[in-house]
Image: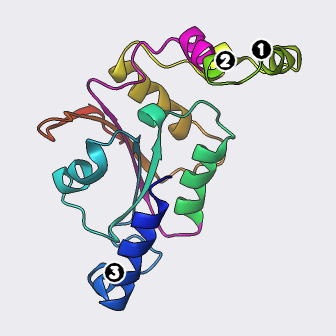
């Protein structure tokens, strides 16, 4: 039994009592920002509060480590859609200290996959099909370098408008303190 019953029960009351009204906004970010950050649970409320953001102020894209691994993958597509179709005009890449992607061992993840029932034959099929799981599951060694790399991928993307500022920051997941890594000029 999962958490779905509790969620649906809560949601029913949320809708009936019109608790959603305090979150009303449009699909366009009021502060015209798009933020790429980590899915870390410590940042769910801390990151927006530390950046003085409320519901509706920014498009927030969350991935493991807040990194872009593919210049033409879904993360970069989301950034471009926010810029071209949703009126964002500034990009912030926000990594954080003590990230779970720091020093991530792809071999261990593959081992955990097989321990939880993914057949070795599936792993082998993927390898022989050209999927490099070790690269795909790799984390990073240094959060600062990771932020600089993602900023560079965005900033140098051939489809990025020339007038878009792209910034890199690191947040302390305990205090919310922001450290500027790369200020777009």
Q: How many marks do you count on the picture?
A: 3
Q: CA distance from mark 1 to mark 3?
A: 45 Å
Q: Which residues are magenta?
A: 85-112
Q: Where's the C terminus, which quadrant? A: top left
Mark 1 or 3, nearer chain start: 3
Whether 60 is drawn above or below 24: the answer is above
Q: Does residue 59 lie above or below 15 as drawn?
A: above
Q: Residues within 10 Å of mark 2 (few under 14, many from 20)?
A: some
Q: Which residue is mark 2?
A: 114
- Which residue corresponds to mark 3? 14
Dividing the picture into quarters, in which one does residue 42 lie? Answer: top left
Residue visible at 64% across and 36% down in the picture: 71
Q: Is residue 73 left or right of residue 5?
A: right
Residue 11 x/y as whole percent:
40, 75
SS under mark 1: helix
| Image coords of residue 60 (percent x, y) | 41, 55
Magenta region includes residue 30 = no
Confirm or deny contact between disc 2 and disc 3 (CB under 8 A): no
For marks 2 and 1, give the CA distance.
6 Å
Residue underneath mark 1: 120
Q: CA distance from mark 2 to mark 3?
A: 40 Å
Q: Are marks 2 and 1 in contact (CB under 8 Å)?
A: yes
Circle 3 — which element? helix
Query: Element type at marker 2?
Result: helix
Residue 24 appears in the rendering:
no
Image colouring: rainbow
Q: Quadrant of residue 69?
A: top right
Report crowding for label 1: few under 14, some 14 to 19, many 20 or more residues within 10 A (C-alpha): some
- Point 49% across, 19% down: residue: 139
């Amino acid at each position: 039994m999962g958490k779905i019953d509790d969620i649906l029960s809560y949601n029913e009351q949320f809708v009936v009592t019109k608790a959603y009204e305090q979150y009303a906004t449009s699909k366009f970010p009021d502060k015209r920002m798009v933020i790429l950050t980590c899915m870390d649970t410590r940042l769910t409320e801390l990151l927006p509060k530390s950046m003085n953001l409320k519901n509706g102020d920014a498009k927030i894209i969350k991935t493991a480590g807040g990194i872009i691994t593919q210049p033409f993958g879904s993360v970069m597509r989301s950034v471009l859609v926010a810029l071209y179709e949703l009126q964002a005009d500034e990009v912030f890449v926000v990594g954080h200290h003590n990230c779970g992607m720091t020093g991530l061992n792809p071999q261990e993840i593959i081992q955990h996959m097989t321990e939880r029932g993914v057949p070795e034959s599936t792993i082998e099929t993927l390898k022989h099909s050209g999927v490099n799981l070790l690269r795909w599951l790799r984390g990073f060694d240094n959060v600062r370098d990771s932020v600089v790399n993602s900023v560079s991928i965005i900033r140098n993307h051939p489809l990025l408008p020339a007038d878009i500022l792209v910034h890199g920051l690191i947040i302390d997941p305990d205090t919310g303190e922001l450290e500027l890594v790369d200020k777009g000029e």
